[in-house]
Image (tube, rainbow, N blue to C red):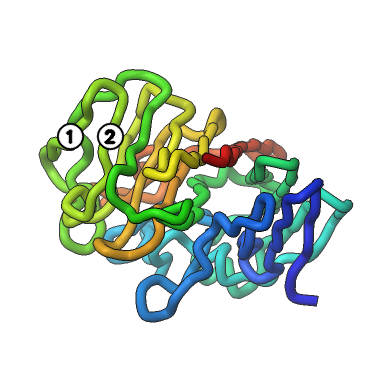
Amino acid sequence: MTTIALASGTAKAEIALLGAEARRWAVGGRDLLWPGDPAIWSEISPILYPVVGWTRDGARVDGRRYALGLHGFARFEPFRVEASGRDFVRLTIGDTERTRALYPFAFALALEYRLTEDSLAATIEVANPGDRAAPYACGLHPGFRWPLGDGGRDGAFVRFEKAETPEVARIAPGGLIGSGRRAVPLAGRDLPLSDALFADEAVCFLNCASRALVFHDASGASITMEFPGFAHAALWTRPGAPFLCLEAWTGHSDPEGFAGDLFEKPSMLALAPGASARHEARWAYRAA
């Protein structure tokens, strides 16, 4: 068994045990997640843990450097099924000799997916079974088909729940957070989508006011992302590619020049021994 199939009414989803990645979500026979393409972007909806984004030349803990790469290692780990039902699954992993070589902390990580007739919810649960505090960040990175309907990509936009500043973090070469900010063409709460918007990498709304946003396709179909358990939202695609990622993060990449410890990395959270935390997001589809 390599995937778990979920069903609710006309909705179907497939969750891979490798990386606990949602590989398919369809409503009424319409596939919503992009299928992946090694020539463009081979992943579909990777799980980000124990960091989000890049660390500058690896992570530093207690004076030692660890080769903790982009978005951490959870998406490469084989998860096991702890509980499942027709429309629900809970997948788990814990620390191993392999993970401790990259991240020297005890952890228990669970991914829960719940499917309804028009939505897919994902919850990341992080627990610290160790005897010292553990820093972490986590995120959800699903790529959706763009366009959602039968038309083209032109005319799509994202509407935020609340007013956001029309400037976002500048992404420096190598994926770090650069100095200064860059303007984006927000019109009220609406952000028109175009290839030019993503020419300078992801559009990252760090510490945003909204906890929900809606991707409106030109066909009239939409996907709403609710992310009450996350501080940051990001939009990403490769110019010309037929997908749009609606991402929810608790953390982000190192700033340029950052040389601090993993505990000092901006936006990291820390779990005390015996503590746990849950971070939930939900995507809901509405047909045209």
Q: Mark 2 and mark 1 in contact (Cβ < 8 Å)?
A: yes
- Residue 35: horizontal and vertical position, in percent? 53, 69
Q: What is the three-letter code of the residue carrying label 1?
A: Pro
Q: How many marks?
A: 2
Question: Looking at the image, can residue 12 be seen?
Answer: yes
Name the side, left or right, on which 115 lies relative to 200.
right
Q: Which mark is residue 191?
A: 2
Q: Which mark is residue 157?
A: none
| Crowd class of label 1 (few under 14; some 14 to 19; many from 20; radius 10 Å) | few
Residue topped by disc 1: 185
Residue at position x 23%, y 55% in the image: 201
**Precedes in sequence: disc 1 or disc 2:** 1
Name the side, left or right, on which 127 lies relative to 226.
right
Question: Looking at the image, can residue 203 be seen?
Answer: no
Front-most of residues 157 and 246:
157
- Residue 79: horizontal and vertical position, in percent? 71, 66
Q: What is the three-letter code of the residue carrying label 2?
A: Leu
